[in-house]
Image: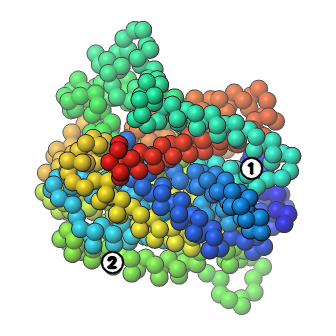
Amino acid sequence: MEEKSSPLDHGSITLEPEIEGESTDQLWLRTVYQGDTVPQFTWRAVLMGGALGMLMSISNLYTMLKVGWAFGVAITACVLSFVIWRGIRLAFPKVSDMSILENNCMQSTASAAGYSTGATVGIAFGALLLITGEHQPWTTLLPWTFVSAMMGVFLAVPMKRQMINIEQLPFPSGIAAAETLKSLHGQCKEAVTQAYSLVAALVAGAAVGFLGKGEFPWQIAAKLKIPELIPFEARSMGVNLKETPGFGWEPSLLLLGAGMLVGMRVSLSMLVGSLVLYFFFGPQALNAHDISAPKAIIKEWALWSGTAIMVTSGLTAFALEWKTILRSLNIVQVKKGSVSNDTENIDPLAHIEVPMKWLVWGIVPLAIASIALQYLAFSISPIVGAMTIVMSFFLGLVACRATGETDVTPMSAMCKITQLTVAVMAPKNIVTNLMAASVTANIASSSADLLTDLKSGYLLGANARKQFQAQLAGVFFGVAAVVPAWYLMVPNKAALEAFEPPSVNIWKSVALALSQGIETVPLSARWGMLIAGLIGIALALLDKYASKKWKPYVPSAMGLGLSWVMPFSNAFAFFLGALIATIWRWLSKKSAELYVVPVASGAVAGESLMCAVIAIIQAVSALTGSH
């Protein structure tokens, strides 16, 4: 079946209506949508995605414990599914090939299973194990993980129309996954050319991942850290930056590719913010004895201000679009049967988008279940439990926007706001502090993950309702795999301590501090939160009301915020990627339009695929006792 041409064919990520009076939604429906004519939500797509997602949920659990990082699943699943299905067709020629939308549906299932279910297990329950020395029973862990992941899926519904259809946020991994599928399924000369470039970048990314990501002897030997090569001392205010964790750059084509996709505005904001932190505010905090060691600059001090700027800017930007919010929540409706010449009040995608009544049907029982679980398992008061649900919506919004702009979901940073709030509402209660924040963590990450998949589907012309159903199915697969894997991989406290888990230790230390009250947060960090929050509001207002001429020069609030919750090495890699794409466009605009997106997508796909494979091997080794 011939597929419709879409903006993806030309490396674009936005839709610009050309017919007078035609809305973006109408243009997309006319030129891109093919969800009613191409198979999408099928049993084989869901089962394939579920099987791949179960494996990746275990690998992500391991990587969360070992390196404090969960790798995206969507691109990995797309490539693996295509290769596996081609093998099945060689063995059984009568089996039909999967359509591109079936693979997209498979991607949604795998992503929900592999990414949306492991965060709570790997961080919050790990920190609780370190504090109490005992595992929580599976009768608590399983429903806790399931309910929070499902809530994340449902809460993404009101955000989709605003962030994907209207704002056209890039969601780099979503673009990469769509580009991967388009190249794999494409038959035209341009698609084949893009596929070759994507495959070449994929191989390069896989090689970098093979050499630099993991703990095998050859990987440790191949790791390159720029500060170790600097022949002179890099100091700022008496602080040796070469001794500061995260200062420099460990080569990563994944981060370079993400920088190429998100663009110069966000990436430059990240670099500038990180430079200011490492060269000025961080050393100043050290000299003032607000923190005790360079390694605490981000982990214990800067994350408060970085989180504040992302939260206030995200909420302000959301509030400024109040008309869109009302429409997306279905508060403003057009009565059936009414006759109106006002085409702006007619929703052309009503039969495709997820109905808001589904949100109510899902959120109400899940919210009640979550509040009940918090009370029965950890004696968290219903008032605090209800507060975590409300905060999860707003912080999930911020996480989705950060993912849309930069491809980074600041899950841990977002949860610090919840931990701070809980410290005020339930002081000196470390279990309440940890587990209430874990609800926000899983809901926020699940929401961002669903929107990334929906971005892929939007570019490919998929039916959003069917993708939503696939994501719901994926949660079942993921929970079925990650819960038993947790107990097998980490049988006791000693086994967890052997991992030296960075994220788990951060959550543990923050919970210990906040359980004693806000006074334990350095005074300078508290002032930083206030100032950063005001900056976030100002940047959101500038981004909304600045003229088109000046808007590209307004710093990205998300970029600045993220630069204070991630290492300098990540921000530097993002900037280098954006710089490569910019120079490429200067040298050859036509070539850049054809190759930048597939090359960047291939780099992201290759390294993430290799890292997932390595993580699976390491997880299996850990399960068999050979690691």
Give how far apart the Cα atoms at labels 1 and 2 are: 43 Å
> Percent from the top left, x then y, of residue 363?
43, 76
Is residue 397 among the parts visible in the rendering? Answer: no
Badge 2, how many Cα within 10 Å: few under 14, some, many 20+? some
Q: Which residue is mark 1?
A: 183
Residue type at numbered disc 2: Ala
Q: Residue furthest front?
A: 91
Residue at position x 29%, y 19% in the image: 239
Residue type at numbered disc 1: Ser
Which quadrant of the figure contains the C terminus?
top left
Position of residue 322 relative to residue 70, above or below, is: below
Quarter of the image for residue 279 reads top left
In the foreground, 531 or 571? 571
Quarter of the image for residue 265 reads top right
Position of residue 619 relative to residue 290, above or below, is: below
> Percent from the top left, x then y, of residue 273?
44, 33
Residue at position x 25%, y 42% in the image: 498
In the foreground, 200 or 92? 92
**Horizontal arrangement in the rendering, residue 138 relative to residue 162 (left or right):** left
**Horizontal arrangement in the rendering, residue 590 relative to residue 436 (left or right):** right
Q: Which residue is mark 2?
A: 369
